[in-house]
Amino acid sequence: MMVRKMTAADVVNEIVEKNSAIKSISIFSPPLAPLIQDRGELDENDDLVLERSSEIRKDSIMPFWDSVMLAAVDLKNIPFGILKSSTYHNKSNSDLIEIERNDISSTLLESFFGALAPNKLIAISSHVKCFDGISRHIPQIDFHCKESLSNLSLIVEIIKILDLKGYILRSGKSYHFYGSSLLASEKFFEFMGRILLFAPIVDRSWIAHQLIEGRSALRISSRPGYGGPPTLVAELI
């Protein structure tokens, strides 16, 4: 089946067009999270955990922080630096830019990319305001598996099991998903809990940070080391 040529900005614009209830959306520009070595002092116990975690990740899809926590288990001395570093969180509510429905377009969203600093990106918040005064969410999922035909098929099945319709995009190293129908705000935490059951195919650490915020977010711009903006690879309609 032919896949339309669409970027993440195009997908967001189409979701707004499909959902007449949406009054406005929000984007923001979080800085890239610093490397673990730059979050505080690490000692030899922390270094040992990092070495062990690298070995764990060699032959698995296990995300970085999952492998680090596993490497810390049964260690004689506690890696205090790593434990403290794991709590680092990028807030998404400090520089939100709200865009009204009539102003939303792929061109406008992409216009924000040009002014980005090298260590920043543009993300779209799941949280949307609606004309009835009730806030809702665009369902979003951040996957953590390598790009391949078999993994794309796996993701398609997960989306079907979750009874969702929408868009799967390649993110540069894995995949993102956007639901085409809105999610009630009171269902947000249940949704996050359901997709957590698919970790580590779904990024557990990403889910944790979204739960802290009470809303999710996905990158729509390019990112160093990831290529250009996320692009559409499959649709479930």
Image (cartoon, helix red, strand yellow):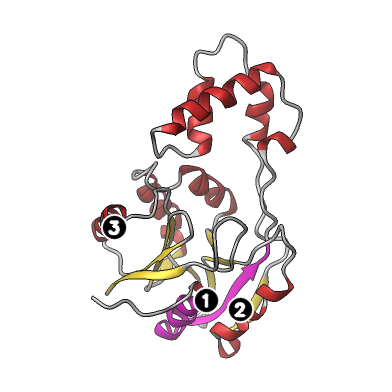
Q: Which amino acid does label 1 sit on?
A: Ala
Residue 231 versus residue 212: which sits nearer the camera?
Answer: 231
Q: What element carries label 1?
A: helix
Residue under label 3, please give it.
Answer: 149
- Image vertical order of residue 38 relative to residue 127, above or below: above
Mark 3 or mark 1, whichever is nearer to me: 3
Q: Does 236 appear in magenta?
A: no
Task: Identify the residue at image location x=24%, y=60%.
Answer: 160
Q: What residue type is labelled 3?
A: Leu
- Image vertical order of residue 44 relative to residue 168, above or below: above
- Is the residue under label 1 in contact with that under label 3 (CB below 8 Å)? no
The 10 Å Cα crowd at callout 3, few under 14, some 14 to 19, many 20 or more, is few
Residue 83, numbered circle: none
Task: Identify the residue at image location x=44%, y=86%.
Answer: 17
- Span highlighted in magenta in the image: 10-29
In space, the residues marked 2 and 1 are separated at their CA atoms by 7 Å
- Is the residue under label 1 in contact with that under label 2 (CB below 8 Å)? yes
x then y, percent, for residue 191: 39, 55
- Count of numbered circles in the view: 3
In space, the residues marked 3 and 1 are separated at their CA atoms by 24 Å
Q: Earlier in the sequence, mark 2 or mark 3?
A: 2
Residue under label 1, please give it.
Answer: 9
Q: Which amino acid does label 2 sit on?
A: Glu
